[in-house]
Amino acid sequence: MSATKNILDTHKDFPTLKRMINGKPLVYFDNGATAQKPQLVIDRINDYYQNENANIHRGVHTLSQDATSAYEEARRKIQVLINAPLEEEVIFTKGTTDGINLIANGFSRGFLNSGDEVIISEMEHHSNIVPWQMACEYTGATLKVAPMNDEGELIFEAFEALLSAKTKLVAITHVSNTLGTINPAKDIVRVAHAKGIPVLFDGAQSVQHMAIDVQDLDCEFYVFGGHKMFGPTGIGVLYGKKEWLDKLPPYQGGGDMIKTVSFEKTTYNDLPYKFEAGTPNIAGGIGLGAAVDYLNTIDWNEVHTHEQGLLKYATEQILQIEGIKIIGTAKNKAGVLSFVHDKAHHYDIGTILDQLGIAIRTGHHCTEPLMHRCKITGTARASFAFYNTKEEIDVFIAALKRALKMLL
Amino acid sequence: MSIQEVSGELIEDFELFEDWADKYEYIISLGKDLQSMNASDKTDENIVKGCQSQVWLTARNEDGIVFFDADSDAIITKGIIALLVKVFNGQSAKDILNNDLTFIDQIGLKEHLSPNRSNGLVAMVQKMKIYALAFSK
């Protein structure tokens, strides 16, 4: 992987970032919800529909074979990106939520029983809570929640203390969408593996900020979506260790996931197709491959330095404003700045900022239990990507001051 | 004054604003001026949940004329509530039911009544109409 692109030159590669919103240049700080797409990705999807559209797998004609090659090439690109040992360990899904549901569904059919436990943390997104609640409800297993401290960091000793012979899986977020906290993934795997417990990471919020190496992490499952890593919506990835994916039952039945079908007995296809029933999101997969091509032109160390610089600067600036409190002050934090004001409501702040061309997210960020833990109803959240700039933070801070002046 | 007349006046007021900031400052001031509901009325029964801001609403019927009391934890939401209350208070249940709220569109606040805004306003308008429906029977 050769780094060719200066991180400060990336902004121009994303056409949406050139838009004017309410007469002002867009400042896009809602990357935690979805990231913008580089021209390269948009062109690739366009080109697929213009020139290559065909259904993949088993087609004998040229178009189908071209589309199949492009789709399977995308799988290999993902494999290399996350350093998965085997191509068939990369399963295409609809997104992070779909990937978690696939595993939760599989576990609830033979891998979870009454008395068993699944461990999540207090900072999970609803997507990594509800599928496990459903699996527990179905199987009689119990959901255990590892607590966090007031800074928004996992209390590691308390987490470790929850691990027992009853624990069948640890499912935990790698990076918190609301707080920005980066969880100690390798330590989590180390203590879980010491007790023979498999680990799933919700990587929805990590893939846009850092290089992911699933062999280095040694987790059993890693799930993420394409749209938060500068690819299209409706496509995501489940990485799973082959031994586990072989064991788990298929999630959905249909075309492509079978080897042979008769009314008496159906045999299932090999990995990865066993988990990919029906015509997949072909354009999405190919577009995601293009997003990986784009990511291969940037240096993750530079991304890290740049985003940490943005976070530090934004944190310093925002704390100079009276009444602001940052929610999530973990030592190890990705480019996410969640905040509340003691008098102004987050909805009002977001509304005025929108009038000034600034896109942030407000609300509970699909982490209601975390909001209860922090005794708040929501936050305003600015989340950064590598294409954001220090100048945009200046615009944001000035706009926030103006909003507060109007609101108070 | 009829609903038509009150909303007509509001549309005229809003036409005077030169930019968005004037408009929002006015809405914010309406929100600040709207009397807050008693804490005892801010019950689970009266809450209209939006995931962004919360709204509370009560209504009473005086001989077919409807009066609303409403509040919100967000000031812009509360300002828009004040507009709705201004238009609907003291009107007949039937007139409230028949109003299609196009004045909100005409004063350029349509986006706040879009369902994806999750500010509780859409649900509040529905609840206002449900009250009016109940009172009209």
Image (cartoon, coloured by chain):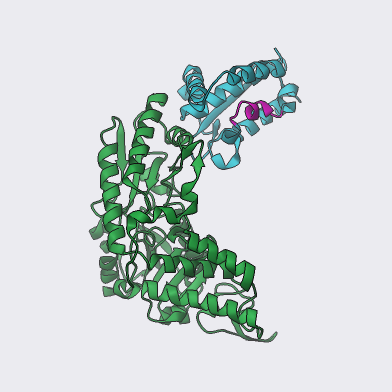
Chain colours: A green, B cyan
- The answer to which of A347 and A171 lies nearer the viewer is A347
Q: Is residue B65 visible?
A: no
Q: Measured along the vertical axis of the image, is residue A9 above or below residue A102? A: above
At horizontal 38% and vertical 56% (from top left) the residue drawn is: A10
Identify the residue at image location x=30%, y=66%. A163
Image quadrant in which the C terminus of chain A is located: top left
Among the 4 quarters of the image, the one containing residue A9: bottom left
User: Would residue B104 be counted in the magenta stretch?
Assistant: yes
Which residue is rendered at x = 49% and y = 22% of the image? B22
Residue A396 lies in what quarter of the image? top left
Q: Is residue A394 visible?
A: yes
Q: Is residue A21 above or below residue A142?
A: above
Find residue A273 and report its horizontal and vertical position in percent: 54, 79
- The answer to whether residue A330 is magenta is no
- Where residue A337 appears, x then y in whole percent? 34, 45
Total marks shown come to 0
Q: Which residues are magenta?
A: B100-109
Q: Is residue A315 left or right of residue B35?
A: left
- Quadrant, the N terminus of chain A: bottom left
Report the residue that reaches farthest toward the top.
B1
Give the answer, above or below, for where B79 lies relative to A298. above
Q: Quadrant of residue A250?
A: bottom right
Picture coordinates of residue B60 (x, y %)?
A: 63, 20
- Up the image or down, A164 lies above or below B51; here it is below
* Lateral position of residue B137 relative to residue B106, left or right: right
